[in-house]
Image (spheres, rainbow, N blue to C red):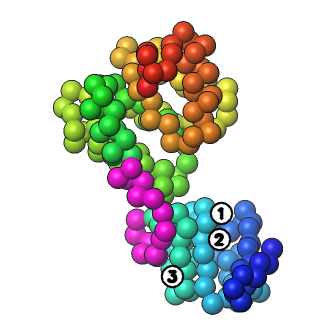
Amino acid sequence: SIFYMNGLRLDTHFGQSFLSLRPAIALKRLVTQFPHDGWILASANRACQSWFYSQGIPTVVQGTAYDGVPLPSVDVDMFSTARHGANVLLRKGHRNLALLIENTNYAGHVKTEQGFLDGVRQFSEDAAGNVFRHNGDATALHRLVVRALEHHSPPTAFFIVNPYYYIAVAAILTESGLTVPKDVS
């Protein structure tokens, strides 16, 4: 796709080959075939970000840059956001927190998990923070939430990373006889 705005040209390119574990050949072909003054990487994995950095191509990451890949990035501070979220739940009296997060290796998800666990450790000695990873499938998410609720110390609060999963989790909690926010946050 090509868009023009304010005299600037913006091309968008997407391909699974750019997100493979070894994207060098596909990326070299891309930047050769479509020479640009700069690149914006959205949803780029570590290998893709690393390749652009190693080539010295002007690049900005839309999202979180991976640790060790010093590209400029524009994103929400996922570490601090999750740390703050854990702190808010702890201040409300919750001591068994659950982080529900997709099982990916996205830099933002890594930072979210780190921030959440840091917040639990930093702000409370008597609290537990457990990470529950899911693949985004509704059936697997259902099993995961039920398993968390059957734990000997079930969570009283869920920190749900992707808002699209909130409705599913709320339905699962209701199905389990719990109400939000009375029984669980």
Q: Do the residues bearing badges 3 and 2 touch, measured as CB atoms within 8 Å?
A: no
For disc 1, the neighbor class at 10 Å (few under 14, some 14 to 19, many from 20) is some
Overall secondary structure of the magenta section? loop
Does residue 154 belong to the magenta stretch? no
Q: Amino acid at mark 1?
A: Ser
For disc 3, the neighbor class at 10 Å (few under 14, some 14 to 19, many from 20) is few
Q: Amino acid at mark 2?
A: Pro
Per the model, the C-alpha gap separating discs 2 and 1 is: 5 Å
Q: Do the residues bearing badges 2 and 1 touch, measured as CB atoms within 8 Å?
A: yes
Q: Where is 67 relative to 118, above or below?
A: below
Q: Residue at x 73, y 73 (%)?
A: 12
Q: Where is 158 relative to 38, above or below?
A: above
Does residue 69 belong to the magenta stretch? yes
> Helix, strand or loop at disc 3?
helix
Residue 50 visible, this orientation: yes
Q: Which residues are magenta?
A: 67-81
Residue ID for mark 1? 20
Residue ID for mark 2? 23
> Helix, strand or loop at disc 2?
loop
Q: Residue furthest top?
A: 177
Residue ID for mark 3? 54
Residue 147 visible, this orientation: no
Left or right of 29 in this view: 84? left
Could you tell which of marks 1 and 3 lies nearer the N-terminus? 1
